[in-house]
Image (spheres, helix red, strand yellow):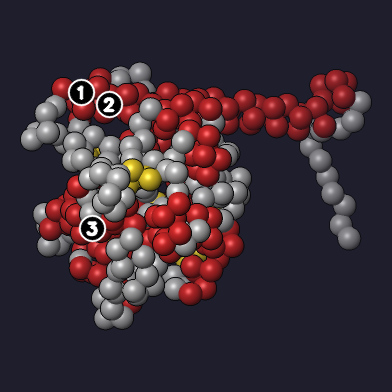
Amino acid sequence: MGNRFICMTKKDIKETGKPGIGSRSKRNERSKRRSLMEEELLHRQALSMAIQQHQLSQRFDGGSMSRRIGSTSSRRRNDFPDQLAVNSKQVPAEFLENIKTKKFVLIHGEGFGAWCWYKTIALLEETGLVPTALDLTGSGIDLTDTNNVSTLVDYSKPLVDYLENLPEDEKVILVGHSAGGACVSYALEHFPNKIAKAVFLCATMISDGQRPFDVFAEELGSAELFTQESKFLIYGNGKDKPATGLMFEKEQMHGLYFNQSPTKDVALAMVSMRPIPLGPMMDKLLLTPEKYGTSRRFYIQTLDDHALSPDVQEKLVRENPPEGVFKIKGSDHSPFFSKPQSLHKILVEIAQIP
């Protein structure tokens, strides 16, 4: 075995009595402080985007309301000139050249809205990619009454409209969270030529003939039992009619979705989440081998998830194998995540796959 040489300074030896330990300890401390500063900068930058979107929603009426949050507004950048990049180094041009599809379309899960992607949007934009987050029907700042959203087709309409208006020569990478995965599957079946890749983030990557609710049956019970006995149901058409939606209480929501999330993210969610339309959750999806079956799918597992347990996610992957599987430790069911950089890194890695 060869000798190992360590370069050190006299100051290191004097301060620690042990070669190299002082400088290594200081480097670790600096690295930790830098990570905390970057996380705080990210939160400030991303939260400013979320707050502005909320303020904009107060100024619109139903006919003119925008359903998108993303990089389409140059005004937003000018509104916040003190925004700082999470990564101080500029992204090399060759990095972006290696990514064929730069447009990301982010689809939220049940009860959430486009606002829930604020951290992911900030990070993707800093990388030079082009994210757009959509509000599904009756979600976020879309004024549709959730009691009137009865089918998965109705629920997915904003995504369908977006893809229909996409230029023929453009493709996007779809990212679906939780029950939004069913909307992504629907899009893969009906717009296979406009979707380069699909990413299911702790999502309902269902098989042909399944309902989104079936995926949550292990945590919530069977659909039939749930619709008969759940105390979280909403009867928008009267108690004598079938339930139209559901809304978890704050304590239940915190335990299911935000068991690992920062307190400030939970607070934002509690004032922003809306009732979940029940009809789309109970809609069976028809998927064909010729369209959905030929799509490029990737799955991201969240390993501290209480709403969709790691075992259930693993079962989805086994029954409906995607092209690739990624895992995030210490992550709950919230698209905020306690580790947004981990999600960002995986999304960029997927974009780079030829």
Single out the residue that lies furthest toward the front: 240
In depth, the one of 338 and 255 nearer the eye is 255
| Residue 337 on image: x %, y % | 50, 40
Residue at label 2? 54
Give residue 236's mark. none
SS class, disc 2? helix
Instruction: Give the residue displayed 52% in from the left and 39% down from the top.
Output: 252
Q: How crowded is mark 1: few (under 14 residues within 10 Å), some or many (20 or more)?
A: few
Residue at label 1? 58
Q: Which amino acid does label 2 sit on?
A: His
Q: What residue type is labelled 1?
A: Gln
Which of labels 1 and 3 is toward the front? Answer: 3
Distance between the alpha carbons at the discs numbered 1 and 2: 7 Å
| Residue 76 on image: x %, y % | 24, 26
Instruction: Give the residue displayed 33% in from the left and 43% down from the top.
Output: 234
Which of labels 2 and 3 is toward the front? Answer: 3
64 sits left or right of 334 in the view: left
Vertical position of residue 64 compared to residue 11: above or below: below
Earlier residue among tags 1 and 3: 1
Q: Which amino acid does label 3 sit on?
A: Thr
In depth, the one of 301 and 239 nearer the eye is 239
Give residue 151's mark. 3
186 sits left or right of 331 in the view: left
SS class, disc 3? loop
Decide: marks 1, 3 in contact (CB < 8 A)? Answer: no
Instruction: Give the residue displayed 42% in from the left and 61% down from the top.
Output: 223
Distance between the alpha carbons at the discs numbered 2 and 3: 27 Å
In depth, the one of 37 and 335 nearer the eye is 335
| Quadrant into which the C terminus falls | bottom left
Distance between the alpha carbons at the discs numbered 1 and 3: 28 Å
| Residue 250 on image: x %, y % | 48, 33
Instruction: Give the residue displayed 30% in from the left and 19% down from the top.
Output: 81
